[in-house]
Amino acid sequence: GFKREGFDILTTLPVSLGEALNGASVRVATVDGPVDVKVPKGAKEGTKLRLRGRGIPRGKDGGRGDQFVEIHIMPPQGADEALAQFMAEWEKSHPQNPRGKGAA
């Protein structure tokens, strides 16, 4: 759904892990109808994309606010043992510490 903040619109965009890692073109709803948005390669959870001029009209002064689209990475559906094993092996050579110092 849409959330309004002043003249801006805020929305959330669910993306797959693959779309976040590899980048993708994804259709996003705006108040004027759907538009295609480029999810940047390596997008992180909470990354905000700005769609200029896709917000609320400012009235007599002209112009419009923007729409901000926040990336929400969804876990893989139907994840199986093969994916779990792949991740366990991958993390051996790519240690992850999402709660450690410097983590987003």
Image (spheres, rainbow, N blue to C red):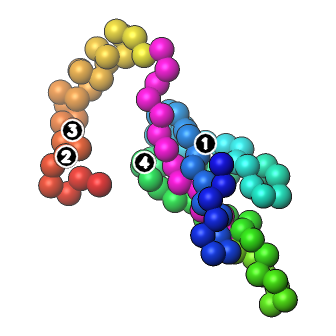
The stretch in magenta equals 66-78
Cα distance in 3D space between marks 2 and 3? 9 Å
SS type, badge 2: loop
The residue where tag 1 is placed is 24
Looking at the picture, which amino acid does disc 2 mark? Arg
Q: Marks 4 and 3: CB-CB under 8 Å? A: no
Q: Is residue 86 left or right of residue 48?
A: left
| In the image, residue 61 above or below residue 77 | below
**Is residue 69 shown in magenta?**
yes
Which sits earlier in the primary sequence, circle 4 or circle 3?
A: 4
Q: Marks 2 and 3: CB-CB under 8 Å? A: no
SS type, badge 1: strand
Q: Residue at x 84, y 89 (%)?
A: 60
The residue where tag 3 is placed is 96
Cα distance in 3D space between marks 4 and 2? 14 Å
The residue where tag 4 is placed is 45
The residue where tag 2 is placed is 99
- Say which quarter of the image contains residue 98: top left
